[in-house]
Image (cartoon, coloured by chain):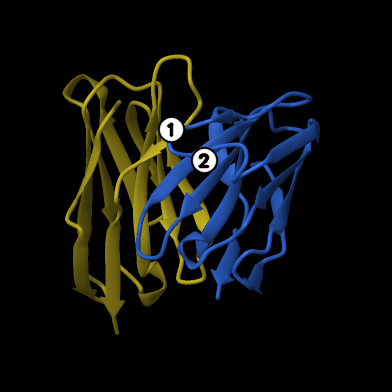
Amino acid sequence: GIQVEQSPPDLILQEGANSTLRCNFSDSVNNLQWFHQNPWGQLINLFYIPSGTKQNGRLSATTVATERYSLLYISSSQTTDSGVYFCAVSQGGSEKLVFGKGTKLTVNP
Amino acid sequence: SAVISQKPSRDICQRGTSLTIQCQVDSQVTMMFWYRQQPGQSLTLIATANQGSEATYESGFVIDKFPISRPNLTFSTLTVSNMSPEDSSIYLCSGTGYNEQFFGPGTRLTVL
């Protein structure tokens, strides 16, 4: 099956710093989503981005489908950005998501 | 976005018992899924909940351990049967709509 690799596994930032999270996938995909799991376990949808670039406030994402990677940018980080960021993909006609292992982000005040 | 609710939000259970988790989605959802997240790990798909028929299970998951029902378009249940401490996890229901998959708040299960 498809492999999804996220990097870095852990990231510690000071409030106000910028960061880039990466997601590599091993095959073509028809869906790619970024999620934020907050400390209470809730998965928050950030982006549905099988290709192209999107922005939402301080967050933006870019997927280069032909090169099989996606990037999530967080600017001017805040303590509330802390948590685990997951990339998940599906392929073919399936809607089943395969998750990466996540990037654990800690933003210190 | 789709609205998905789950209950219970958390439970502590004894070894050998069973727990049924309920998931309610809004009418915009088409497909429904159940995932497990073991402590400190990522999410793993348990099964696809099929309306009015048997669920489709992923490798490593069986119906006897995780029976699933979906009697109508907007409701599904997952039962964790004959529980052991290894079943302690967060169980999440999800649904697809508008090309995206949305998740419920999860059920945090602890088995003693």
Q: Chain of mark 2?
A: B
Taking A34 as reference, is B6 above or below it? below
**In the current view of this chain or complex, which residue is farthest to the top?**
A93
Residue A1: x %, y % from top left: 30, 25
Label 1, label 2: how many angstroms apart (C-alpha)?
A: 8 Å
For disc 1, the chain is B
Give the percent coordinates (x, y) of residue A106: 28, 73
Q: How many marks?
A: 2
Chain that is blue in the image: B
The image shows residue B4, relative to residue A38, as above or below, that is: above
Q: Nearer the viewer, residue B21 or A86?
A: B21
Indicate the amino acid at tag 2: Ile
Residue contact between numbered discs 1 and 2, judged by CB atoms under 8 Å: no
Question: Which image quadrant is residue A91 in?
Answer: top left
The amino acid on which the numbered mark 1 sits, given as a three-letter code, is Ser
| Residue A100 visible in rendering | yes
Q: Which chain is yellow?
A: A
Q: Which residue is mark 2?
A: B46
Secondary structure under tag 1 reads loop
Screen quadrant of the C terminus of chain B:
bottom right
Pinpoint residue B94: horizontal percent, then vertical percent: 60, 42
Q: Secondary structure at mark 2?
A: strand
- Residue position marked by numbered label 1 in the rendering: B59
Q: Residue at x 63, y 73 (%)?
A: B14
**Is B12 on the left or on the right of A79, as rendered?**
right
- Res A9 quadrant in image: bottom left
Residue drawn at x 36%, y 61% is A84
Between discs 1 and 2, the one toward the N terminus: 2
